């Protein structure tokens, strides 16, 4: 029998909760991890439509990147869609676990997956965070690395759009026509760390949820900005499933692993 504790214990050797930022809320979100797990679903977000799919697919463990209980509930009024979702999860006996900034920081985690998608080599952490408490390896959030060709800003924007398969993205470039060879990337909302990208010698910074004045500061300092959105982190659905399938073989877990099929990106685009 494979329990939620078995799954959590193995995962936390890979991405310890100690790697998470102080403001974050990773780990067990809801449910009883002592129960047997027969079917696990990986997802970026836990939204009502994802929970509906999980219930229909007889999933009993949801492994997410974004914490479902990031903001504490002030009441349990089931007219609130978020609270109703909690009730559905509990009624269905589904356990929910989230790995957020610890997965962003871990070696082989979120930001390595994104850097690999871009084809970056010779990567290093964007924001140094010391050493991993389990492996002792150097760790940090984000990645900086090189790419095997030079791009103009417009060429690199097109490359990112194709690589991440997004219908649209925002980009901004300095007026010095600087070619792009060294790239920093941070999944999620990373505008606060653009100066770290500069210090690491990046020509371009790829991150989501950027705002007007931050972007002005970036290009004023010679840094090209590519904002493909927050949802590119959905790469975790496939990559986490691969991890769990590997561990399933290693530890003889008798579980089925599926990926969420719902697009949880809230944005639509018009040209």
Image (tube, rainbow, N blue to C red):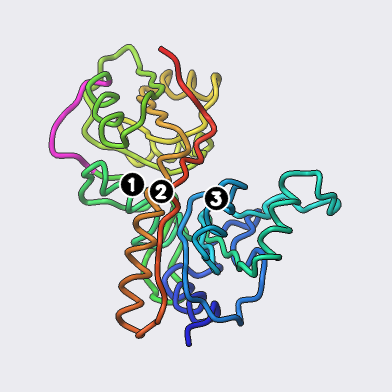
Mark 3 surroundings within 10 Å by alpha-carbon count, few (fewer than 14), some (14 through 19), many (20 or more): many
Question: What SS does tag 1 mark?
Answer: helix
Tell me the residue that label 2 is attached to: 142
The residue furthest bottom is: 1
Q: Secondary structure at mark 3?
A: helix
Q: Nearer the viewer, mark 2 or mark 1?
A: 1
Q: Locate residue 270 relative to residue 96 in the image: left or right.
A: left
Closer to us: 222 or 110: 110
Q: Closer to the observer: label 3 or label 2?
A: 3
Counting labels gives 3
| Residue 107 screen position, x and y as percent | 36, 62
Mark-to-mark CA distance, 3 and 2:
27 Å
Cβ–Cβ below 8 Å for labels 1 and 3?
Answer: no
Q: Which residues make up the magenta segment?
A: 146-153
Callout 3 touching callout 2 (CB < 8 Å): no
Residue picked out by circle 1: 114
Tag shown at residue 50: 3
Please say if 168 is above or below 205: above
Q: Residue at x 49, y 60 (%)?
A: 57
Quarter of the figure with residue 154: top left
What is the spatial separation of the Cα atoms under label 1 and label 3, in whole angstroms?
Answer: 23 Å
The answer to whether 108 is drawn above or below residue 170 in the figure is below
Q: Residue at x 22, y 42 (%)?
A: 146
Residue sitting nearer the eye, 217 or 166: 166
Q: Would you say 84 lies left or right of 127 here?
A: right
3 or 2: tag closer to the N-terminus: 3
* Residue appearing at x 33%, y 53% in the figure: 112
Q: Position of residue 32 (x, y in %)?
A: 65, 75
Asked whether disc 2 touches disc 1, contact meaning CB atoms under 8 Å apart, the reply is no
The residues bearing labels 2 and 1 have C-alpha atoms spaced at a distance of 9 Å
Where disc 2 sits, the SS reads strand
Q: At 47% across and 44% down in the image, what residue appears?
A: 262
């Amino acid at each position: 029998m494979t329990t939620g504790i078995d799954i959590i214990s193995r995962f936390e050797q890979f991405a310890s909760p100690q790697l998470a930022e102080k403001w974050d809320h990773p780990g067990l979100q809801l449910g009883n991890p002592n129960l047997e797990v027969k079917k696990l679903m990986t997802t970026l977000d836990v939204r009502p439509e994802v929970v509906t799919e999980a219930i229909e697919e007889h999933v009993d463990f949801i492994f997410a990147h974004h914490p479902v209980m990031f903001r504490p509930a002030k009441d349990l009024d089931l007219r609130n869609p978020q609270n109703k979702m909690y009730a559905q999860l509990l009624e269905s006996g589904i356990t929910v676990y989230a790995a957020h900034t610890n997965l962003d920081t871990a070696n082989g985690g979120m930001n390595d997956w994104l850097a690999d998608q871009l084809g970056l080599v010779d990567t290093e952490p964007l924001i140094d965070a010391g050493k991993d408490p389990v492996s002792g390896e150097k760790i940090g959030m984000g990645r900086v690395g090189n790419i095997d060709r030079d791009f103009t800003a417009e060429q690199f924007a097109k490359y990112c759009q194709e690589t991440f398969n997004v219908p649209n993205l925002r980009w901004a470039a300095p007026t010095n026509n600087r070619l792009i060879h060294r790239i920093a990337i941070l999944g999620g909302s990373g505008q606060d760390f653009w100066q770290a990208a500069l210090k690491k010698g990046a020509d371009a910074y790829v991150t989501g949820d950027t705002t007007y004045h931050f972007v002005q500061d970036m290009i004023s300092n010679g840094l090209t900005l590519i904002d493909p959105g927050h949802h590119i982190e959905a790469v975790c659905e496939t990559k986490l499933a691969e991890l769990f399938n590997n561990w399933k073989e290693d530890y003889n877990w008798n579980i089925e692993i599926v990926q969420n099929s719902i697009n949880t990106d809230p944005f639509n685009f018009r040209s």
